[in-house]
Every structure is written in C-alpha cells, then in structure tokens.
Amino acid sequence: MQEFLFTPDLIVKALLGFVVGALIGLERQKKMESERVAGVRSFGLHSLLGAMSVYVSEITSNPVILFYGVAISIILVGTQVYWKLFRTMGKGLTTPLVFSLSFVLGALVGFDTPPDGQIFGTLQIFSMSVSLLVFLVLGFKEELAHAVEIVTREEMISAVELAVIILFLWPLMPVTIQLGIIDFPAFQTYFLIVILLVVSFGNYLLVKKYKDRGIYFFGLFGGLANSEAAVSSVTDFYVKEERRGASRISLSINLANVAMVLRNGFLLIIIDHTFWLFRLYLIPIAILIVFSMFRLLTVNGMKEEEHEGQLFDTKLVSPFEFGPAIRFGAIFAGVYLIQLVLTASYSGTGLIIAAIIGGFVSAGAVIASSASVFLLDPALYPEVGMAIIIATIISVLNKIIYVYLADKETKLLKIVARDSLIIGAIIAFYLVLFALGFV
C-alpha cells in the first residue's frame, strides 16, 4: 500500500488538486477587498480535499472517505451561503458557487488516472480547462458586462442563429454530395461559409471599436468581410463629406485590397494543406502590403483637410451578416461547378475562363474553388496558379468600377484608378513570369 501511495501520479494529483482551486481563489482574493473572503488558500485546499477524498476512497475501496469529503464540502458551502444572504445581506452567490465548483474540479483530478507515458489524464485536462475558463470569466466580469450592455437585440438573435448553424448543422453536413458524375464538396462549402461568418464577426467588433480612429481601420477590417462593400461604403462617406480627403479615402481602399488578399491567403491555407498555392500567393500579398505601406507614408506627408466628427455609416449592420456569406457560398458552388465543367471540356483553359468571370464578383470564391480543383487534380497546378493570380488582378481592378458607380467625380476616381492599375500591372508581370516558368 505504501509503495502505491508514493508514486509520481500521487504527486501530480496533489499539486494539480490544489492548483485548480487556487487559480479560482486567486481571482476571488484579488476581486474582493475584505480579508475574510475565501482566497487562494481556501479554494486550493477545498479542491485538494476533493482530490484526496476521491483518490483515497478508490485505493482503500472505502466510500466513507468520499462521503466524509462531500459532507465537509456541503457544510463549508452552506456556511458561505448563509453568511452571504443572512449576515452580510449581500447580493449574488458567485463566490459560494465557484467555491463548490472547486471541490468538483479537485474530485475530477483525483478520480482520473493518466495513460502510460502521459502526465495528465483526460479528466485532469478538463478540470484545468474549466478552472482557467472560470478564472477568465470572473476576471473579465466588467468587460463582459459592458459588452452585454451594448449588444443589441438583433445582434443577440444573430449570434443564436450562428450557434445553431455551427452546433447543429456541423455534424449533419455530408462530406460530399453526388451531382451526376461530380462529387460536390458540401462540407467544404459549409465550412467556408462558417469561416466567413466568423471573420465577419471579428470584423464587426473591430470596426465597432476602432471606427472613431478613422477610415483606415474601416478599409482594413471591412475588406476582411467584403472588399467591394467596404469600397462602396468609404466612397459613399467621401461623397457625403463633400469630397474631402481623397488621398486618405484611396488609401482606405488600398487597405481593403490588402485585407482581401490576406483573407484569400487564409482560405488557401485551410483548403490546400500542401501550401503550394499559398506559397505562390505570397507574392501578390507582399505586393499589396508594400504598395499600401508606401502610400501610407506618402499620405501622411500630405496636408489635407480632414473631418473627424462623423462616423461611418457602415453597411455592417449586424455582426453576422448572412447575405454576403450565403452569396459567397453560392458563388463558390457555381464557380466550382463551372470550373469542373470547363476543365472537363477545355482542360486548364476552363479554369482561367472561370477565373476571369468570377473575379469580377468574388475573388475569394474563385480562389477557394480553384484550390478545391487543385486538390482533385494536382497536375493542373500551373492553370490553377494562373487562375488565382488572374482573379486577384481583376478583384483589384474592379475597385475602379465600384468607385465610379458611387462617385463619378474624377478626383478620387483618378487616384484609385492609378493605384489599381499600378498594382494590377505589377501582379500581371508576376503572372507572366509564372506562366513562363521563372517562378
């Protein structure tokens, strides 16, 4: 019995049994000003009591030890609840609740036995994860309360809808759907839609937080969701503000293009795990970033009239705007099927034709579908590479069209046209080098 007790497993359980509770107690001790509140020692010893009760009860095959530990825990938690409600007349039961939780976390640590060759078992990892989660939730209470206060009813409904899409549809989505002789990647399409919704959520938070700081944030963050919509929004703002700050608006449009290529590069990483296409796409990403940095330095050196009072009337009315995501999925599906049909009829030429057509609508959908075609037939790497680069060029050039549709005056249009043509020409030169085999 003594040899069994003094094992590395016992040491790990003793230390971990104390830590999972002490971490929660650390937050409680820092948060509460009273010296009489339970802190690191109380929480740590309470969770250690749970670990010891379960462990000793198992190795002695005597459940009385466990019942004793549970009884002690009930008495301690009950005393806390009584003192909180009837003696101090305090509000809330957070401390007694997490104090009782510390005993359960310790019990999980004591119950688990790690597999051979591993330090921690599954339940022990789960216990550590819950302890850290509770620490974060309690530690950022004010930030979470502030976030809840500013969340609108529409945002809450949208969040629930997104949760339903992820939690309920994920396990039901088939990997492929048979469409005649074509295996359509249903799960990949669904996964890309979810990714775009998550990106839109992050973009919404960033725009909502930083929009006071200027148009650059909106151009960059807006381009993550939809670069064309971002360009239309900043151009509309430019017109409403009596066409002031054309250079800064044009830089915001450049940043939308940067966000677009970064998002497309991320899609390539998700789809193509060989990273061949992503390595090819690094040059367009670098071209957009370097050019935008140059324009940023140029614009900062110019003195131009600015307006800092009004915020953007953004089109991101919800953190989960399903329209662009569903549209992306539809375009991806359509372009993918067109590419397969054109590839079967015209080989690699069909890929390029589909890229030229689809690039005017969504470069991201073209790039994602092209990467999917590459997975089916890696021999089409040259044609897929050309399709990806062509779609990027067209997506940069189509910003001229969106600016023209929103503002037919020549000042901003000339700057955007100049920047787009320069970027397009540089990427086109890279396309020529790739087609000739120099890249």
Image: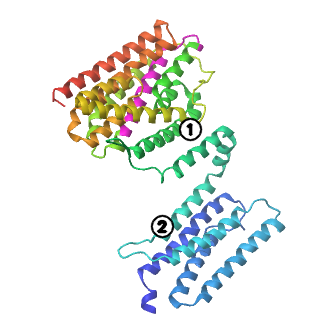
In the structure shown, which secondary structural element does the residue marked by tag 1 occupy? loop
Q: Does the magenta stretch mainly form a helix, a strand or a loop?
A: helix
Q: How is the image coloured?
A: rainbow
Q: Which residue is mark 1?
A: 320
Q: What's the amino acid at mark 1?
A: Phe
The answer to whether residue 87 is left or right of residue 295 is right
Farthest-out residue, front: 180
Q: Which one is nearer the viewer's eye here, 261 or 328?
A: 328
The answer to whether residue 419 is left or right of residue 378 is right
Q: How many numbered marks does the figure carry?
A: 2
Q: Is residue 191 above or below residue 124?
A: above
Q: Which one is nearer the viewer's eye here, 153 or 113?
A: 153
Magenta stretch, residue numbers? 240-267
Screen quadrant of the C terminus: top left
- Residue 425 sits in quarter: top left
- Residue 290 sits in quarter: top left
Give the number of the disc on residue 125.
2
